[in-house]
Image (cartoon, grey):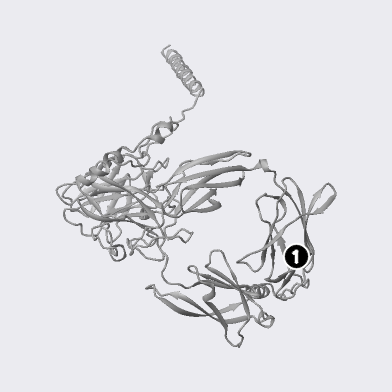
Amino acid sequence: MKNKEIIQNYWYYFLSYLTIGLYVISCASVGSINGGPKDVDPPKIVKSTPKMFATNFKEKEIKIDFDEYIQLKDVNQQLNVSPPFKKKPKVWLKNKTLIIQYSDTLKDNTTYTLNFGNSVSDLNEGNIYNNLEFVFSTGNYIDSLGVRGKILNAFDLKPEKESLLAMLYSDLSDSAPLKETPIFTSRADKDGYYSINNVKPGTYRLYALKDKNFNYKYDPGTEAIAFCDSNIILESTEILKSQNKNVIFPPDTASYKNPKDTTHKKHQVDSLALKRSKNSIYKELFLFNEKNKGQYIKNYSRKDKHNLDFGFYKPIKYDSVFLKLVYFDLKSWYLQEKYPTHDSLSVWITDTNIVKVDTLKTIVQYWGNSNKGDLIWKADTLYFRNTLIEKSEKKSEKRSVKKPEKSKSGLMKITTNASGTVDLNSLPCIETEFPFTKVNYDKIQLNQKVDTVEFPSKFEIITDSLSLRKVSIKSKWVEQTNYKLSIFPGAFEDLYKMPHDTIISSFTTQKLEYYGKLTLKLSGVKIPVIVQLLSMDKVEVEKFAVSDGNIVFDYLQPKSYTLKIIYDENGDKRWTSGDLIKKKQPEKVIYYKEEIKMRSNWDIDIVWEIE
């Protein structure tokens, strides 16, 4: 009887546990655990050796413990130590600990700042610890003064894509960045903001550098630089003066628990930067590449057997460039074609016997400057080999085939941009393959087309003052009208007496209502200025002003524009870079505060008061 009861109890408990298990499983199948909200918080520091802002530190190692596993990315490029170490410190991870070891002897009574940029993030989600900074001192206190601001490209006022180094020197000489390493540094972020923190009181010179080789020194000709005109005096009185000026703060680097909450994140000011601003001076720096004082031939080629191309380091005087062929006693064998930038030159060979020569040894003579800036007479010996021949020979070697035969057409190519829809203020051009010696105007016709009827339209041929191969067509265009441009054989006679085919091109003029008009009233003009109207960073129209007054931009297409002014201090009608040793800043650039959205058949008036 007992055995029977035991068996009944066994089955009772078995069925009970089975029922409970099935119930739990059925409940669990209703939903699945998703792990909660996504982690958007960066790792947090829980402990460090030494402690943050420690004093009297003399050790050779730093350990920073985080609350989760972390990873490093580009730490060797992003880590910035101020004052700089002579040798790069070793940085690695062990579990949740970041370890930094260095062999440099630390300076006495000095505050050190280690900024890791954006190289530290958590392992799972990749949340970045923005501008992780660790500070300690070898003395009895932490220095708390600093310099901060923004580094922008001097020409377009945009931040650089590459990392920039802001530098403080106690050596106040202009040559300090060339021969010494700075005593305090900081790396700018992607928006150009920099902050040199924990600096001791004193007088300094401030620079910014695109330090390509990471040697903390300025290498002219290969690196861009910026400098502050005046000394930086880090004293309480000077800092208080700077507090009255309007300054810009970088965006908040603090993390937000709600990733969708971006409204106040955009306008929030970095709490740490706000605190440090009370002890720092704000300075904007404008980066530029110095122009080498010397003149030299930067590149050269012979892409076509008929001409030689030269690129010079800086603008040249075309009447001071002379070419002489080695092995040929010829006085007149080429024509010079100029370029608008005045730093390039194309030489067309006029002697057909020279054209046939595969390789030309040429002496190029020109006036240039030495590295000291002295005017000297230079002579370079260059070898010009027809690159088309070289390419054909290489292809022949690879494919084991005969050289391609030359074109048998014997015709000169002529092109024109008079096609599609032409703007009412445009000057359509005709371009020939080779320099022409004569234009026969009677063999160029411009006709208006009304339905099927054509009748002549008055026009004028304008030769280009620089190009030997281009002319423009000037006419009083009638809006929304069909035109036909006809270029008959013999219209252009070129150097090599090559004929050309008939070229027929049809186009339609734009309607007048399509365009908008901008009238800019300038005031405050004290020196010559270059006024540029840009669209998508491309200069659409450029005008010059030497005094207050109105500047009219008409026939504008309906799109967005920006206005830019260059203070043309030397009056050469182009932007001029700076000079470090001469303490000459690049010519100042400013932009109008708002984007201009032009619409068809619309007039916009703008008043711009400049300083």
Q: Which is nearer the eye, 118 or 552?
A: 552
Instruction: Determine the residue positioned at 54% across, 72% down.
Output: 318
| Vertical placement of residue 265 versus 508, above or below | above
- Residue 214: which quarter of the image? bottom left
Q: Position of residue 281 (x, y in %)?
A: 27, 46
| Vertical placement of residue 8 versus 77, above or below | above
- Residue 208: which quarter of the image? bottom left
**Can residue 536 be seen in this snapshot?**
no
Q: Position of residue 215 (x, y in %)?
A: 33, 62
| Vertical placement of residue 579 versus 10, above or below | below
**Can residue 272 be seen in this snapshot?**
yes
> Is 392 left, or right, of 314 in this rendering?
right
> Is 568 left, or right, of 244 in this rendering?
right
Q: Which is nearer the eye, 40 or 567?
A: 567
Instruction: Determine the residue positioned at 49% across, 47% down.
Output: 549
| Image quadrant containing the N terminus | top left
Q: Residue furthest right?
A: 452
Question: For the residue marked with disc 1, what is the amino acid?
Answer: Tyr
Q: Is label 1 in a helix, a strand or a loop? A: helix
Kindly identify which residue carries mark 1.
441
Q: Position of residue 62 (x, y in %)?
A: 25, 50
Q: Position of residue 441 (x, y in %)?
A: 75, 65
Q: Residues within 10 Å of mark 1 (few under 14, many from 20)?
A: few
Q: Residue furthest left?
A: 140
